Each structure stands twice: as C-alpha cells, then as structure tokens.
Image (cartoon, grey):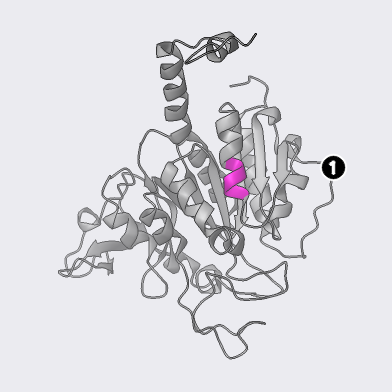
Amino acid sequence: MCEIKYTPKDFKSDQELRWCPGCGDYGIISSVQKAMAELGYPRENWAVISGIGCSSRFPYYMNTYGFHTIHGRAAAIASGVKCANPDLKVIQISGDGDAMAIGGNHFIHAIRRNIDMTILLFNNEIYGLTKGQYSPTTKYGKVTKTSPYGTIEQPFHPAELALGAQGKFFARSIDTNVKLTARLVQEADKHKGTSLVEVLQNCVIYNDGAHSIITDKEHKDDRQIVLEHGKPMIFGKEKNKGLMLNSQGRLIVVTIGEHGITEKDILIHDSCSDDPHMHWLLANMTAPELPVALGVIRNVKESCYNEKMEEQITEVKNTSNIKCMDDLLNSGDTWEVE
C-alpha cells in the first residue's frame, strides 16, 4: 500500500457531475471516493467498469482507470479486466436493470465464479435513464410508464439472487448514509472474491420515495438495523429492540426489558458462517414488521477464480515440455517439405 495520504478529491475527475438534483448517486460517488482515499491505494490501481444507466456514468467522474461498457455486460468486462491484470482493484457499477435484467446471466456467473472484484448495485427499483419503466426489482403493483395498471411481476431480491449463486460476500447500504457506504466499500475491497454491495438508492424523478419506509426521520431508527459481526442484533431509537428466533425458526422483534428478555437473549450476528440460512433470513427482512438489514450480512472466505487461474497457469507451465514458440512448432508430428 502506498504511503502517500490521499483525499477524496484525488479520485474526482474534472468532469461535471450530471445527475438530477437530489439523485442518490451523488451520495454514493462521495462514499466511493471517500473509501478509496482511506484505503490508500494510488488511483492508477483502480479500474471502474460500468454498464448502461444513470449509475453507469460513474467512470467519467472518477480520476481512475475506467470503462463505460454496454448494457448488461459490465460484469463480463470487469471479469476480463481482473483476470488480465490481477493487480488492479476492480469496481463494477451497475443499476438494478443493468445487472439483473439484460445483465442477469453475467451477474450470477460473476458471483458464482467468485472473481476478486466489487460489484456496487444501485437499486432504485426503476429504469431512470430511459424514463421510468419498471425494473426487475420494482415492487409488485407499482404504477410505472410500462405498467400503467400496476406491475404483475414478483420482483427479484438481489440478496436472494446472490446467495443462490453461492455468493460469499453480501452487504447493503443506503444512499443517504455516506459513512456506512464508504465503510462497506472498504470491507468489500478486503474480501477476496466477488463482493456484492447493494445500495438502496432514490430516484427523485421516476421513483421518489422508493425506500421512504426506512428513511423517513421519524421511523428510520426503528426500521433499520446496521449489523456488525460478533455483536448482538440490537436497534431502535432507544437501542432497546433486538432480533430473536421464534419457535417456527422465524426472526421476530423483541424489546429488551419486557417479558424477562435481556441483551443475552438477542441473536449475535455471524457474517462468517458457511451456512447461508441466517444470512438469507436477515437479508429478506422487510419493514415495518422487521427492520431492514444494512451492513455486512455475509462474509465467507473462499478461494477466488483469478487466483486459481493463475495457479493453474503456473502449474501447467512448470510441467509442460513446451517452453517457447519453437518448442510448440516442433511438437507433435512434423514434416520436412522439400
């Protein structure tokens, strides 16, 4: 790691940010630049790869290497970048439509392969750049430009999709919490393998208030829980609410001090458990019945694709009789033509 001390400004390009006033993307890019500065790697060590969408303008605004690719293909390009140059820190920027609609196949296989890169998924539950069509994460019944009578599709849950693809790292933040998002980007960078960070984001034009149930000032403390590994799952304005399992194995909210419940009864978060069942339960909590889980939900060690690829190449080189192009051309059956 470089000894030079960086600031977020070092990672800002000279391009004017062009998102709608009030867009959640402003908070997210501030978080990423803050995280990069605190991690301390030179800007030349970073590559920001995006697809198509409002979020995918990201590379233009970053003073790093970058590539604005085509719709749904950011994961494929990012995978290639990391495998071609394993020393680069690769961040893929995608929206919910870019990643899970046209890019769904690349998305799940990047996670399954466990390539050492970070995917930032901006989830505003709408297609913003193309003016308000419903996306794979749009809530059931939502009225949009392409569902004037309400959607009749069940939405994807990014966490379920990631866990189903054998994902080893999943975290969630919200665009209004710059500090938390920056911390999760740093945690994702430290994880060896594909790290998925879902950022709940607001689109002020086409889906304003998509996440208001957990962001309004009156209720947010009681409807959000920031999980920390090894700590009890406690939340609420008074820090007196917690999570327990009932007799059916479902998560429930309890109040410390009522019915004889103490802090010792509250579940302890284990993000490193190989068994994804609890991670699945936590990631699928919905307000107002349960708090929405933020923070690192799953963080399991596993060898990553690009490291295994490099090991395999080295092994083949060491055991092969072919050491140069002449060896290759003269291998097998050869003939002399007179």
Q: Residue at x 84, y 46 (%)?
A: 15
Nearest the camera: 239 or 186? 186
Looking at the rendered structure, the kind of residue marked 1 is Asp
- Percent of width and height locating residue 178: 60, 51
Q: Quadrant of residue 47?
A: top right
Specify the segment rendered in magenta: 74-78
Q: Secondary structure at mark 1?
A: loop
Q: Is residue 121 left or right of residue 224?
A: right
Judging by the rendered image, the residue that carries numbered circle 1 is: 14
Q: Is residue 338 visible?
A: yes
Image quadrant in which the N terminus is located? top right
Q: Is residue 327 above or below residue 262?
A: above
- Percent of width and height locating residue 229: 35, 45
Q: Quadrant of residue 281?
A: bottom left
Q: Is residue 82 above or below residue 221?
A: above
Nearest the camera: 286 or 164? 164
Q: Is residue 228 visible?
A: no
Secondary structure of the magenta portion, mostly?
helix
Image quadrant in which the C terminus is located? top right
Q: Residue at x 20, y 57 (%)?
A: 265
- Percent of width and height locating residue 97: 60, 64
Instruction: Check if residue 75 falls in the magenta segment.
Output: yes
Instruction: Check if residue 306 falls in the magenta segment.
Output: no
